Image (cartoon, rainbow, N blue to C red):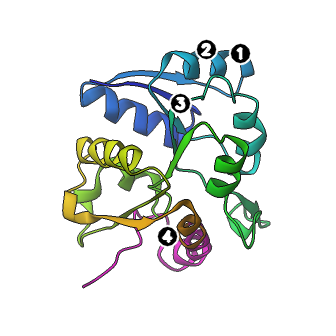
Amino acid sequence: MTTIAVLGNGRVGGNLAAALARAGHEVSVADRTPGVAADAAQTARIVINATPGAGSLDRLAALREELRNKILVDVSNATTDGPDGLPAGLIYPGSSLAEQLQDALPDTRVVKTLNTMLFPVMTSPAALSQTPTAFLSGEDPQAKRTVRELLTDLGWHKEWITDLGGIGTARATEAAILFVPHVIRSAGFTPFAISIAR
């Protein structure tokens, strides 16, 4: 059992919080109110960033002390929106939200994952007709091992999880968000994930 704070109480955060609680973890959910988020981060061992990516950097940088020595699991994508509200571009081209967070929070172990799929797949990967892939990016091997264990609690088989390496590899997975609007327009809002076939 791990103490986890989920920052963001929308569809992504709510879905993750419910699934992790069912798996036996002690989970708190905080909205974007600074004081509430600070209290939740302070008492947790692991913090999940499920806030909208466009504002994540400012929100989490303000929690630098509360996030010291914690694992920050970043599942967000920082994008600009098109007229239909779907992602149209990257806010950090040539970088990534995860890298920006790691730079702003040097005493926090940032791990990027679960950002290459629609949110229902995060907690129900086996519901897809084909095997999905969850990617890990981060500098700290132990933090990635801990996050890998969390993913197995969410239903991810170990062989479905691929460690890409350091935090710089998050550039690739965050860029995959640019697939999403085109897939949704062509096939509708049906759960899907990026997968590596071997």
SS at mark 2?
helix
Which residue, given by chain and number where applicable, does mark 2 sit on? 39
Across and down, in percent, residue 27 comes to 40, 22
> Which label lies toward us, 3 or 4?
3
Pointer 2 with pointer 1, Cβ within 8 A:
yes
> What is the span of residues highlighted in magenta in the rendered image?
174-198
Q: Which mark is residue 35?
A: 1
**Mark 1 near mark 3, Cβ–Cβ under 8 Å?**
no
Tell me if mark 4 has few (under 14), some (14-19) or many (20+) residues whose alpha carbon lies within 10 angstroms of its own.
Answer: few
In the rendered image, residue 150, in percent from the top left (x then y), is placed at 31, 41
Q: Earlier in the sequence, mark 3 or mark 4?
A: 3
Q: Earlier in the sequence, mark 1 or mark 3?
A: 1
Q: Quadrant of residue 88?
A: bottom right
Q: 1 above or below 15?
A: above
Q: Helix or strand or loop: what does disc 3 sit on? A: loop
Mark toward the viewer: 4 or 2 = 2
> Do the residues under discs 3 and 2 have CB atoms within 8 angstroms?
no
Q: Amino acid at mark 1?
A: Gly
**Residue 188: which disc?**
4
Q: Is residue 191 magenta?
A: yes
Question: Marks 3 and 2: which is nearer the front?
Answer: 3
Pointer 4 or 2: first along the chain: 2
